[in-house]
Image (cartoon, coloured by chain):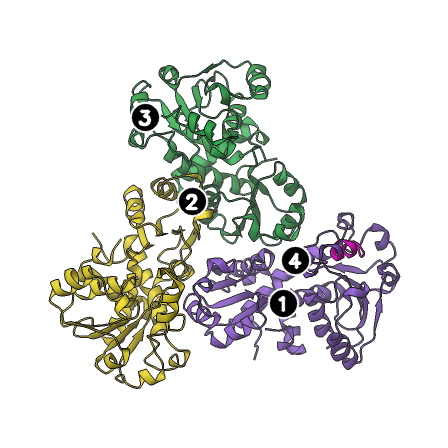
Chain colours: A green, B purple, C yellow
Amino acid sequence: MSPLDLSVEELAKVLDLANDIEKNPEKYAHKCDGKILATLFYEPSTRTRLSFESAMMRLGGKVLGFSSANSSSAAKGESVADTVRTVSCYADICAMRHPKEGAPLVASMASEIPVINAGDGGHQHPTQTLTDLLTIRSLKGRLDNITIGLCGDLKFGRTVHSLIEALVRYEGVKFVLISPEELRIPDYIREDVLKASGHEFIEVERLEEAMPSLDLLYMTRVQRERFFNEEDYVRMKDFYILDKAKMALAREDMLVLHPLPRVNEISVEVDADPRAAYFKQVQYGVYVRMALILSLLGLGVDLC
Amino acid sequence: MSPLDLSVEELAKVLDLANDIEKNPEKYAHKCDGKILATLFYEPSTRTRLSFESAMMRLGGKVLGFSSANSSSAAKGESVADTVRTVSCYADICAMRHPKEGAPLVASMASEIPVINAGDGGHQHPTQTLTDLLTIRSLKGRLDNITIGLCGDLKFGRTVHSLIEALVRYEGVKFVLISPEELRIPDYIREDVLKASGHEFIEVERLEEAMPSLDLLYMTRVQRERFFNEEDYVRMKDFYILDKAKMALAREDMLVLHPLPRVNEISVEVDADPRAAYFKQVQYGVYVRMALILSLLGLGVDLC
Amino acid sequence: MSPLDLSVEELAKVLDLANDIEKNPEKYAHKCDGKILATLFYEPSTRTRLSFESAMMRLGGKVLGFSSANSSSAAKGESVADTVRTVSCYADICAMRHPKEGAPLVASMASEIPVINAGDGGHQHPTQTLTDLLTIRSLKGRLDNITIGLCGDLKFGRTVHSLIEALVRYEGVKFVLISPEELRIPDYIREDVLKASGHEFIEVERLEEAMPSLDLLYMTRVQRERFFNEEDYVRMKDFYILDKAKMALAREDMLVLHPLPRVNEISVEVDADPRAAYFKQVQYGVYVRMALILSLLGLGVDLC
């Protein structure tokens, strides 16, 4: 349901498993032979859905499901709880995406099979956070003692909030929060998560001034649908565009992450830079979902 | 095409096969290796589609298809016969759902592979009826000598009509038809099926008065789309809601079935009652579809 | 990207492989075990999508993807290049259908996995052309020294243009172009392809007069969406309908091909004629896609 459902120790084991899958894919190619994953997507999210489907197929399993609400029984007035109890008869595990916060939690309580939250409204998107953590740990070698810049829409950015909540569990993490005034991090993250945990953090308005100090830069998309009017969107969306000039200010081993899809907040000229890690991140997303599916089916890490 | 396409003897063998699959799933896990099922759904029906897909996957087979008409070649003016002849080159068996009565029959005549009717308009939904029969026989031990209550929308309820037509082939079945005046069973069922077969039946208006005599209660959804105006729907939809109080009037071994999805005609407080069999019914739906697919591919019961 | 990307020699080898698959399907049933095909269909084309999916499944592989643009990340403003780089992490090969000419080419340059053009606007549909060539060669025994009639919408018919471009590479091919004045072959095909190659061709208005001379008749659909007004469509669509009477004018070994779906340009009474080869063509479409997938994955013909 949430990345925090895993203890730091459990999480370390899941990430270890994901790295072992990366190194020895053939060892895992038949672990889920005969198993079925149901992808229940009440709102479209091709990227997340295909990542789950690829993960299950790479484990030897099969996939069924639906990719939008209008092709589901929800249109006939069925509750999420009933749908998931029904799907429990069709599959061994399911991944649910829902526009309503908490829907996957309700589902998991009714379900007789494991339910993975594949995103619920503005609330959680735990497998994205696991992906981010795996990418950072794999490419930097650690999750502690890093300086991470988070740039863009920090007000509505669900992935940013989740990543902060996940990283404050590690020592020596410094946060550089880069956003326009209007899209600053919400109070409950600033006060209850960052200040409460005692981690160092600063808020800045210009990406350039943050660049030199960063080990990692986490860029996010300015989502058109989060804005109340088109004018605000147009004015702000190009504020924080990462290009070659800004990359020249960064350390040689700084990494750029992005949950994707991007629109234009990272210029395509940055793609060829070896520090651009956002497509590797997609690949890590498959490995971590493989590790999670295995563990929830009792074939990987022992989770409570 | 219709549940009556199977003789009572053939049907018994298909249900036997389904029960054997239930007991020994691993024996059947590779029977359809290398085989492909096409799901041709000209109108959405997630539940039925996923049940077929799960059935094929549990047999080791693969699945392709479409889940609504606008994503099919029908939009380009192609006939159902041409579509199914084409699909004959892609798959080994197909399941077709179509809003038009008789479309699957037309398809089966043009097809070079077996075609299963997965529901055609208000006409037939044979695999639902096979599911109902398997559930009854598995949980009650017999299909004859039972008193079955059928409750709700008996006028438009396709599954109810099919179930009655299937059950009159067995001896000693008594029917208790529970519905508001406006939604009584149609004449052709009352006269040509029930009276013609000589089976005992009564029609009542109140669910409470029927409860004590029943071995089985088959609940159905009051489908909003069947009503001519919203007012009628609102007035009648809550008439026949099964709750704990009504369950207290029933025998200890009475079973509750429902083709699902339900809206509110069965209160969720009934779900925990051991007599609630509607989620088990979903599971039986997978087993009976597995038995049917096997048989139509020449790997199960010998059907003419 | 285009059927002309293969040299005549490479093409011959791909068609040989397709014929070997036809004769020995079991030899290829596990060649793609553990491999994943992504079907990225930015516009619906059930027939083409299912043909690719069947091809991959018949090779033992698995399939994921989307069947229309609104269920893809494109709706969030993502570029085709980014989508395909992401999908490179989920699959081993992909087939892309796109309404915009050149989109699959752009994708193939960004991709780390092979990209097959499954149709891009009015531009190319190379696997249809490979299908046509395989059908002709398999059923006539050769691609050279044939007289082929092309009938219907020769102005907008993408498959006709591609087939002509592919056939002028063989000796002794004569073209009979049968269409109403308004839908004649475009100048660039007449001048740059037919005349430039030195092949014999004639243009006629009546299907009847062409029939006796043909080894092959390639019929095409008059697509409603290509017309500017409904009136023109209604007036012309029934001009060139193939029926039993016209078939009586043809040679005994003439073959009828059609890329399908048909509306009414071939009367259903022709279906039973042994010279009707359009459903066999569908089957050859699966074999040639199997050969292409194998070759692009390095498991079949060596392609540069």
C103 is higher (above) or lower (below) than B214? above
Q: Position of residue B43 (x, y in %)?
A: 55, 60
Task: Say left or right for C42 vs A167.
Answer: left
The amino acid sitting under disc 1 is His
Q: Position of residue B121 (x, y in %)?
A: 61, 67
Which label number is shown at residue A27? Answer: 2
Chain of the residue displaying label 4: B
Q: Secondary structure at mark 2?
A: helix
The amino acid sitting under disc 4 is Val
Location of mark 4 (residue): B282
C157 is higher (above) or lower (below) than C206? above
Q: Check the picture and name the quadrant holding the N terminus of chain A.
A: top right
* A228 and C121: which is toward the camera: A228
Q: CA distance from mark 3 to mark 4?
A: 55 Å
Q: Is disc 3 in contact with disc 1, using a CB cutoff of under 8 Å?
A: no
The amino acid sitting under disc 2 is Lys
Q: Tag 3 or tag 2, which sits nearer the N-term?
A: 2
